[in-house]
Image (cartoon, rainbow, N blue to C red):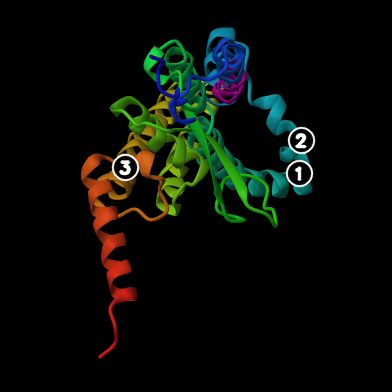
Amino acid sequence: MTDGPHVAPHAQDAPLPVARRVLRPLGYLLVGLVWTALALVVLALGPGILLWAALDGGLELAPLLAGPASDPGEAVALLLAVPLLVVLWGAGVLGVLPAATWPLAALSFVYVARSFDPRRAHEPLSATRRVGPGAATGVPTAFSVALSLQPVHGTRTTDLLMRWYVTGWQPEVRQVVAMLPAGAAWLLAFAGIAQDVPVAARVALLVAAAALAAWSAVLARRAWRRRFHDAPVLGDVPVSALDPAQRRARLAAARARRGTRTRPGR
């Protein structure tokens, strides 16, 4: 008696080739290290500069202000540069760029660990979602933008990381505005660290910087809650960044819209 015909397992259930399973953690590790390096560069541009200046103890404002003090043109340029610096450092270096780098590094390392899980041997660990032109952080393009390293299966950890992810790559205006006081705080702290500033003025500058940083933290927390907790359905946020209740709300809304489109007219 012979056995019946052997039925091959479904392609989706078949384990990935051995070579791919071996290389997959190495690939995610390399990607994670690249994003970690970028995150460290961003960190160096923000708090890193202040920490270096404070530890070095040689920062002085007089050489930086000598030109503007003697040249009206340079003085005007300085006055124009200050608000620009506040915007770039607050919204960019302290706001969007950190959220656009370290979550991808963390997600990559999560996938490194998942690569060794036999239960995930037959499936991809991450996916890429494409968004329209101008819908993601970066240089404006005429084409869609790929947002990669998004988890195929979400957990509490990846859900939290994805919220930071979209904060960096698809920030809302209120989240960007919330970081502007932090940019002013960075500038005041830079001046407060300078050794040629009178002690009383340094204390006042550092206290003001701390107050602005705290204000920015409050605004950022409020913007975070409005985006990820208060809104019942988040159409511009990937499903992997939503909690279970928000996923159910989005699914219910999608079913309601589909029912409205298919309901025959009266």
Residue at (55%, 45%) from the top-left corner? 87
Residue 196 visible in this rendered orientation of the protein: no
Residue 41 belongs to magenta span:
yes
- What residue is disc 1 on? 74
Residue at (71%, 38%) from the top-left corner? 69
Q: Which of marks 3 and 2 is nearer the N terminus?
A: 2
Question: Which quarter of the figure is the C terminus placed in?
Answer: bottom left
- What residue is disc 3 on? 242
Q: In which quarter of the image is residue 52?
A: top right
Name the amino acid type tagged 3: Leu
Query: Residue 186 location, x and y as percent?
Result: 50, 31
Question: Which quarter of the figure is the N terminus placed in?
Answer: top left
Residue 177 visible in this rendered orientation of the protein: yes
Query: Residue 143 location, x and y as percent?
Result: 68, 54
Relative to residue 34, is residue 50 drawn left or right? left
Name the amino acid type tagged 2: Gly
Relative to residue 216, is residue 53 drawn left or right? right
Magenta residue span? 33-44
Mark 1 vs mark 2, CA separation in Å:
6 Å
Mark 3 vs mark 2, CA separation in Å:
52 Å
Query: Residue 218 location, x and y as percent?
Result: 30, 39
Q: Residue 67 carries which label?
A: 2
Mark 1 vs mark 3, CA separation in Å:
49 Å
